[in-house]
Image: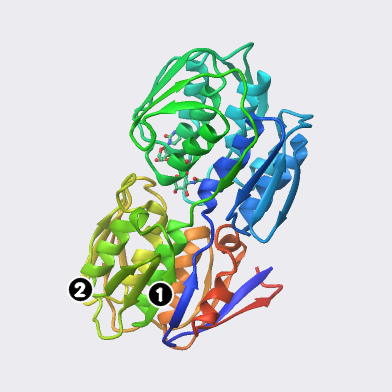
Amino acid sequence: MDKFVIHGGKKLTGTVKISGAKNSVLALMPACLLNSGKNIIYNTPEVNDVYTMIKLLNFLGVESDFSNSKLLLDTSQIKSQIAPYEHVKKMRASIYVLGPLLSRFGYAKVSMPGGCAWGPRPVNLHLEAMKKLGADIKLEEGYIIAKSHKLTGNKIHFDISSVGATGNALMAAVLAKGTTVITNAAIEPEITLLAESLKKMGARISGIGSSILEIEGVEELRPAEFENISDRIEAGTMLVAGAITHSKIAIDYNFSHHIEIIIDKLKESGANLLINNGIIELDATNSMINSVDVTTAVYPGFPTDMQAQWIAYMSLSNGTATVVDNIYYDRFTHVPELIRLGADIEMHNNSAIVKGVKKLKGAKVMSTDLRASASLVLAGLAAEGETEILRVYHIDRGYQKIEEKLRALGADIIRVSTKEY
Ligand code: UD1
């Protein structure tokens, strides 16, 4: 078990490169199950969720090779259509194998993902979509068992916009017979990349980037090479790291159009930002932190995956900010930990009322989930004295060597192996 030890208050300086996006590659990797042969995904982040997905795909019979962010997946020898509990319990995104296995092999048995540290996370929309395409779905002994002789295109409407369910429906529909129309489809960049990647394999999809996707099923797909996008949440987290420490830093990130809302909110908070040729410069050296409200929403709204980091930032603002999470109502396990560092936060249902304090003070805190951990790191960078963050395995799920990147910017942060839990 590792922990981070941070001595806060250091100014950051320099440029940090943003790694490949975790959430897009977690959809793209299982999408390769739809074809037979060698696929290559460039710009794959070296994070634990990717290793978990590789293990699951290996279990299904996929051969893999992963080095220097180049991931090779050979899908020509698939021998199982079962995603066991051991793999799925570690990572909900394992549910992404359902659509591809079902549509290519007519059968998939996938362990039901459980809840999360921040509450229930249902998969009903994924299952409804499979049923619409003609699958017979049963739930037995904790497993989803999906069968179909041949999936058939249909109209699928999602009452709630869901990234995962849209991805799964898309992957199932590309090999279905006939035409599928998905309405209220998620328009997150990760879904756009998935749809474009499926097209590279030979899928027929129109409406990419909009909330209406039309898919004309094809007989088979071919392997291909893909370039992953870079991680918009890592980009946002690093920019907040610069802002919360009143620093001047830059991020090497080509996708500023994916984080417009974060850039706008940072500007509102008083930071100066300049975008130039794939580099975003942030200068927060002279600014006070203005309190800025945010409400999470589906893309292009403020991402729920940046909510925890924003609360950490607003803890040091000059007023009171209200941070509302409308995607995951219970996703606030970081709040009690931030309060341990001296933050003044009150919860009212899914709203955090964050009253800015003059300073945070280092303490021992506990990571509870991926983005909660990121918020504690940000708070620790700004806090006076020493902050210890336990259970950083959560942060390793989705950030590639965050402590090394921050140290390269001048932060005083080290990883220490510990028996503490
Ligand atoms: C993905 C991201 C996660 C991000 C989330 C919201 C991955 C691997 N994870 O998760 O980091 O926080 O999008 O942007 O890409 N819902 C249902 N029934 C379902 C599915 C979802 O009611 O079957 C609800 C959820 O409870 C939530 C909302 O829909 O309130 C959106 O969730 P969804 O977009 O599906 O999140 P994930 O794809 O699981």
Determine if residue 139 is in view.
no
Q: Is residue 276 above or below residue 101?
A: below
Q: Position of residue 34 (x, y in %)?
A: 63, 29
Residue pictured at 52% horizontal, 59% vertical = 370
The crowding category of the residue bearing disc 1, from other C-alpha atoms within 10 Å (few below 14, some 14 to 19, many at least 20), is: many
- Count of all numbered marks drawn on residues in the image: 2
Q: Which residue is mark 2?
A: 319
| Quarter of the view holding residue 316 | bottom left
Q: Nearer the viewer, residue 273 or 343?
A: 273
> What residue is drawn where x is 34% and y is 55%?
257
Local crowd size for mark 2, using a 10 Å CA cut-off: few (<14), some (14–19), many (≥20): some
Q: How far from the left and from the top, in percent, is residue 68? A: 67, 61
Q: Is residue 320 left or right of residue 359?
A: left
Q: Amino acid at mark 2?
A: Gly
Element at badge 2? Answer: loop
Visible residue check, residue 196: yes
Between disc 2 and disc 1, the foreground one is 1
Q: Which residue is mark 1?
A: 250
